[in-house]
Image (cartoon, helix red, strand yellow):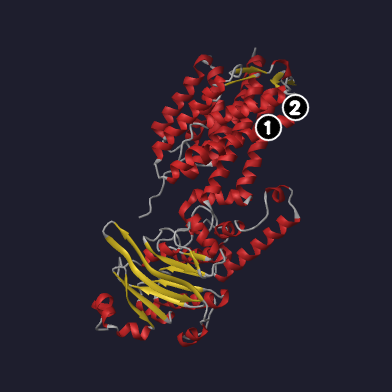
Amino acid sequence: MDGVIILEILQQLANGLALGSAYALIALGYTMVYGIIQLINFAHGEFFMIGAYAGVLAIKAGLPLYAAFPAAITAGALISAGVEKIAYKPLRKKNSGRLAALITAIGISIFLQNVIFLIPGADLIGLGTKNPMGIEKYVFGSVEISGTKVYIFLISIILMIIFIYIVHFTKSGKAMRAVSADRDTAMLMGIDPDRIISFTFALGGALAGAAGLLFALDQNQVSNFMGLMPGLKAFIAAVIGGIGSIPRAMAGGLILGLMETLAVVLGFSQFKDAFAFIFLIIILILKPAGIFAMARKEKV
Amino acid sequence: MYQANITLNELQDLKSDFELLKTEELSIHFGGLKAVDGVSFDLIHREILGIIGPNGAGKTTLFNLFSGVYAPLSGRIFFEGKAIHGLKPNLINERGIARTFQNIRLFSDLSVLDNIRIVMQHRADYGLRHLLFNTEKYRMQEDEILRKSREFLKIFGLEIKHDITAKNLSYGEQKRLEIARALATEPKLLLLDEPAAGMNTAEKEGQIELIKWIMLNFDISIILIDHDMPFVMNLCPRIIVLDYGKIISMGPPGKIKKDPEVIKAYLGEESHA
């Protein structure tokens, strides 16, 4: 009997880490965009959805998995940078304020969901038996873990390592940190903030696109509303960690994924979404700047 | 620290004939307030020009116009003969104007070395491709950037603090790092906003030598703003006095000191000294 419980816990732990690392991938986009232009980009979940569609269509067209990921990543990056250019940049140029941008983001989100819905036959596309991840299982002694979950976890971790490398070692990544620290000063030091903001959106969109394909492979389908819940959850993850910070968003994603899985283990699987939002409310009441936030010393 | 060992008169003789910056009837108003009102002057290559004036005289606003933070309401600014008024700050910086700030504005959460490296890397011409494949070009340019950054830190006595977060430096060190970062953008004109603020007499003397040394060694022009009269008078062969956004006097320290307009506007309470 004990063995069964341990097996159950390990399986759920794998589920939690897989879900959490995918949340973390999406949350990075939220946190970066917030860090650089103080916008909660509620259209981010739709970049995730568009990336998933691109990846799934590539697989249905007969392309292998290693070609489907670049397709999802490119689609995510293009839609993200495109939305920034068409919708947010004109607002920024007119100094329209944060509220206008936030409402625009919600508008873009609803628009993209419904555009896909209007394409005949596009609202739900199943992968069927074409799913390259299949239903492989890894057996460790008496523990069985689903292969897809392991792949999701590993691919997410690899993408996050590449991402951190880009942020810390490329000149655009460093310029991004400079713009995020002080946009006006960065500009006076010769850095073009518009170019860096586009780069930030593209990078966030790329990660969201990859996460979208991972979700699609796990669910074996894509739908036009698939970005809504993961988008909100990733937003929660970013807030839990402390929005604006890259490592904290990743940690927030993992914590949220594990929390949700814990809810399932405890027998509340129907309430796991409610769990995430209740968790958000508790965090906002107790530690509004994120769980990792330390008391800020005020300089006088 | 570096010593220039050069007198004011020698500095005066060093100036070339090349006109670097020229302003014509520069004006900007905020509401009813004329912050800068019809300012015209020019600046020669290898000149150190001081701008003084009482609080609110429009000194920092003038810097904001030169660096593109504000566009002038009327009037024109020429840099190396080309109009630059109304350009975005990053483009003006690319043309060769860099500045520091009255209230220090470093990238405070980045390391001392990264503060310098970021502005240099931004100019490097390798792309993501070079980085991912760790090409020769990437490594050579990165090595060069690191070497140059360390050189800058050495000049400003910050080499041993290269991995400290900028916000943890002392006030004086932060001011020096800000100058180093501005120089790392390879300017032809450096704008220093109160470079001696918060310094004691000995530090101010060191700062005078450093600024002279920067001008000579980097072969650039410098415009500086400061409240400290002896500091400006010991450093700048030519001084502009602003009051209510207008130039009320311009010339060598000797002339400024005796100008009754200046004494009235600025030295009023100190005129007995």
In the rendered structure, the residue with mark 1 lies on which chain?
A
Q: Secondary structure at mark 1?
A: helix
Estimate the x, y position of residue A92 in percent, counting from the top left: 44, 44
Quadrant hosting residue A282: top left
Task: Identify the residue position indicated by label 1 in the image.
Answer: A71
Question: Would you call the spot at circle 1 few (<14 residues within 10 Å), some (14-19), or many (20 or more)?
Answer: many
Image quadrant occupied by the N terminus of chain B: bottom right
Question: What's the CA distance linking mark 1 and mark 2?
Answer: 10 Å
In the rendered structure, the residue with mark 2 lies on which chain?
A
The residue positioned 53% from the left and 17% from the top of the image is A266
Q: Amino acid at mark 1?
A: Ala
Numbered label tally: 2
Depth check: B198 or B76 in front? B76
Q: Is residue B45 left or right of residue B254?
A: right
Query: Is A110 located above or below residue A181 in the figure?
Result: above
| Labels 1 & 2 near each other (Cβ < 8 A) | yes
Q: Is residue A254 visible?
A: no
Task: Identify the residue position indicated by label 2 in the image.
Answer: A63
Quadrant hosting residue B198: bottom left
Counting residues from the start of the chain, the first of labels 1 and 2 encountered is 2
Estimate the x, y position of residue B9 in percent, counting from the top left: 46, 87
The residue positioned 38% from the left and 54% from the top of the image is A299
Depth check: A10 or A59 in front? A59
Query: Is A165 located above or below residue B95 in the figure?
Result: above
Depth check: B73 or B247 in front? B73
Q: Amino acid at mark 2?
A: Leu
Query: Is B71 located above or below residue B273 in the figure?
Result: above
